[in-house]
Image (spheres, helix red, strand yellow):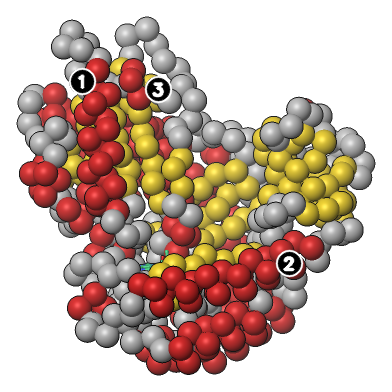
Amino acid sequence: MVETSTQQTDISPAPEQGAGKDSKKVFVKTYGCQMNVYDSTRMTDVLAPEGYAETTVIEDADLVILNTCHIREKAAEKVYSEIGRIRKIRDARGADAKPMKIGVAGCVAQAEGEEIMRRAPIVDLVFGPQSYHRLPSLLKSVAAGEQVVETEFPEEDKFKHLPAAKSAVTKARGFTSFLTVQEGCDKFCTFCVVPYTRGAEVSRPAGDIVAEARSLVAAGVKEITLLGQNVNAYHGKGEDQTSWGLGRLLEELSGIEGLARLRYTTSHPRDMDDSLIAAHRDIPSVMPYLHLPIQSGSDRMLAAMNRRHTRRDYVELIAKIRAGRPDLALSGDFIVGFPGETEADFEDTMSIIREVGYAQAYSFKYSPRPGTPAASHDDQVPEEVKSERLQRLQELLNAQQIAFNASKVGDTMDILLERKGREPGQLGGRSPWLQPVHLMAPDDLIGTLQTVRITGITKYSLSAELIAPSNANAA
Ligand code: 5AD
Ligand code: SF4
């Protein structure tokens, strides 16, 4: 599931790298989930050998790619207005300027297909998530003057083509990295477009994942987040030719020296098997944080959503995971105003939040996605009711998040220092529970794990001080 696509992030591309004098430039704008962030990286990696360097300046680009997300409301409309904006930028370069090609990738591309060319003929290339490895050959057709739409789900397994991009992926862009282990989803929740835009669930062979993780670590990465729309449905071929679940994969990855932290996102309650639960208990590098959406606390709504589990199943599952890892922080996704949701159903959602306790969570008003079963239900909830419920729900979630953060004040913990902070002399990193942490520390500690004491909280982050200002305990 794309459940972590909850942050509708607008991620700017990484700084320019390796731009040779004659090289072409690609500007990639990424919307939505971490999967898209990873895919954008992979696209630029596939394009690098073709002479494309990444740029952050759209005006300079020979190729602009919008890597789109379809999970939010009016996603396609937003893409069309962005294309209009790019057109203005392109036209302002004047007739003598080098041509600017425009590509639309991601889930809106997959969902809209030919329609994009019809509504925005300026677009040269529309390609879905299954075709990124084919980008160089698609661009050749574009260069030959064709308008290309590539949104088929090919018979071949696209992961087979990943090794080609693997060497490039290892040019790590920091100390944390995403790594896609599976794609697609077979769950068919009735509100969700993912099974249609990303297709059926496919897992990468474990050996490829381990090799990619090793090269990331060799390039300096200390923390890897395994990605998948329904990541814990992972069932890749293991190095011993048997089928490995995510727990077994984490065990293997935890053996990589220098890989201090492992995370994964995003999971479905039905796929939390015993070996994954055991991984949380037994593997120190598996961080005590779990994004496990329930969407609603009402069994009636869970059934209508086709979630295939009850509230009780979820509560029992959480208890089982917490038995092995009592400090586990939970994150989730919630939808309010699903068709037919009554005030009593909504109260069930509020009560599950109180019962379980979330360190952090994402919440949405239900919005119909064309082609999904729930979109045609005739008992849609009025907009004002959804807004009012969302506000109440978010107040509760915010209060829980602040309480969780406050509970860490005075504690000692290891922080992976990832980057410079906003203030001079400040560095930023993450706690094991994924909380952003800021502290004063010398720049040469970036990329190391440091033991800190939490001194206070700001709205959604923690402030801290170094306990032993040295890099002696760096991972
Ligand atoms: N309406 C509202 N929220 C949705 N999500 C997915 N589809 C919809 C929809 N049609 C939310 C779910 C999912 C998260 C990624 O986005 O909570 O877990
Ligand atoms: Fe997640 Fe359900 Fe969508 Fe699959 S269908 S990605 S499980 S919300």
Q: Which mark is residue 218?
A: none
Q: Which residue is mark 1?
A: 91
Q: Please identify the residue farthest to the right as the structure is shown.
A: 468
Determine the residue positioned at 31% across, 64% down: 194
Q: Is residue 391 visible?
A: yes
State the image quarter where residue 402 is shown: bottom right
Compared with 55, 35 (above or below) is below
Q: Quadrant of ligand 1?
A: bottom left
Q: Which residue is mark 3?
A: 57
Question: How far apart are labels 2 and 1 at the CA level?
Answer: 50 Å
Q: Which mark is residue 404?
A: 2
State the image quarter where residue 167 is shown: top left
In primary-sequence order, the first of circles 1 and 3 is 3
Q: Amino acid at mark 2?
A: Phe
Q: Is residue 429 left or right of residue 391?
A: right
Question: How far apart are labels 3 and 2 at the CA level?
Answer: 40 Å
Q: Amino acid at mark 1?
A: Asp
Determine the residue positioned at 41% across, 70% down: 365
SS at mark 3 in the image: loop
| Closer to us: 457 or 386 | 386
Determine the residue positioned at 25% across, 41% down: 81
Residue 18 is situated, as x and y percent measured from the top left of the image, at 45, 17
Compared with 23, 469 (above or below) is below
In primary-sequence order, the first of circles 3 and 2 is 3
In primary-sequence order, the first of circles 2 and 1 is 1
Compared with 59, 43 (above or below) is below
Q: Is mark 3 within 8 Å of ligand 1?
A: no
Question: How far apart are labels 1 and 3 at the CA level?
Answer: 15 Å
Residue 197 is situated, as x and y percent measured from the top left of the image, at 25, 59
Q: Residues within 10 Å of mark 2 (few under 14, many from 20)?
A: some
Compared with 442, 201 (above or below) is below
